[in-house]
Image: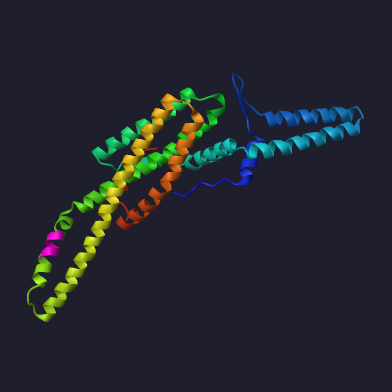
Amino acid sequence: MAEHRVGWWTYLKAAFSFRMPLPGLGGIPVNYLCLFAGAVFAGLFLLAGRLNAAAGVLLLTAAYELLYLNLLANLPKFRALVKAEALAQQHSAAAQQPLQTVRLLGRDALGRYQRMAVICDDIGRLLNERQEADDASWVEALQTGGLNEIKELFARLLRHRERLLKHLNAPSSLQLPGQIKQLASELKRDLPEPVRRSREQTFEVLKQRAEQLQGMTTSCDLAAAELDRLEQHLALLRDQAAASGAVGEVAAQIDGVVEGMNDSAGWLLDSERMLGEDATATVSVDA
């Protein structure tokens, strides 16, 4: 998963059109109102023939605009909000993407995914219940962005672990240690040179297979550990959302979980490539 980057121009555009949430009034475009007021006063002075006053109002309006855009675009909380909303837009077209993997899961893995999804839904519900007016856009972005990323990675980890276990538990994999032991014993005996060379080559192939299976075992154990970690972290986030009601703190925690998933996504992608395309991935997904 690549880190989502937001450019300076995006922050400026968001600051220019930002609507200040006010209780009972919804989002108020403060910047638009101030610019409109400046234009109106400048026009009135022009109509009255007071050119210097009109120019002064225009200069003050331009100075206000520059100061407003610079301050708001550099405000850490506002930048985090813009980044969260951009992330939500990035993933809105792929909101159903986790379903492609979920539909391939076995019964046990599917049940585990559904339990995790309930926790994510609880987090979103608790944040919505406790949100303050100025945090509304933040919560919406988190629900459609960060939490969806967590669901997607969780589903991929479950499916990948299933595929690894299927391969590791195949008869050819389970019989490999016995084959290596038997061939090693055979190589200790006196054998005709052509037979020995053939056996030694076979032995090297078997050892390479064993190394490959060991790598799969490590990946399977790592997937299991990552699944446990995500479940516990999500449970903690749900507890925090229920106990403190501090939307900004929980939002930062969710953002931290998403950023921390970069390492997991990296090795997972490499391991998925090692297994190749999922043979059952042709299952269609309902919209």
Q: Main secondary structure of the magenta part?
A: helix
Q: Quadrant of the C terminus?
A: top left
Apparent side of residue 216 relative to residue 81 in the rendered image (left or right):
left
Q: Residue sitting at 18 percent across and 57 percent down?
A: 173
Apparent side of residue 218 relative to residue 88 in the rendered image (left or right):
left
Residue 60, located in which quarter of the rendered image?
A: top right
Instruction: Name the residue nearer the viewer: 49 or 202.
Output: 202
Number of marks in the rendered image: 0
The answer to whether residue 34 of the structure is visible from this angle is: yes
Q: Is residue 47 magenta?
A: no
Question: Residue 218 in the image: x percent, y percent?
Answer: 28, 53
Question: Residue 7 in the image: x percent, y percent?
Answer: 60, 47
Residue that lies at the very extreme toward the bottom in this rendered image = 193
Residue that lies at the very extreme toward the left in this rendered image = 190
Q: Residue sitting at 43 percent across and 29 percent down?
A: 124
Apparent side of residue 142 relative to residue 53 in the rendered image (left or right):
left
Residue that lies at the very extreme toward the right in this rendered image = 49
Question: Residue 143 in the image: x percent, y percent?
Answer: 46, 33
Magenta span of residues? 177-181
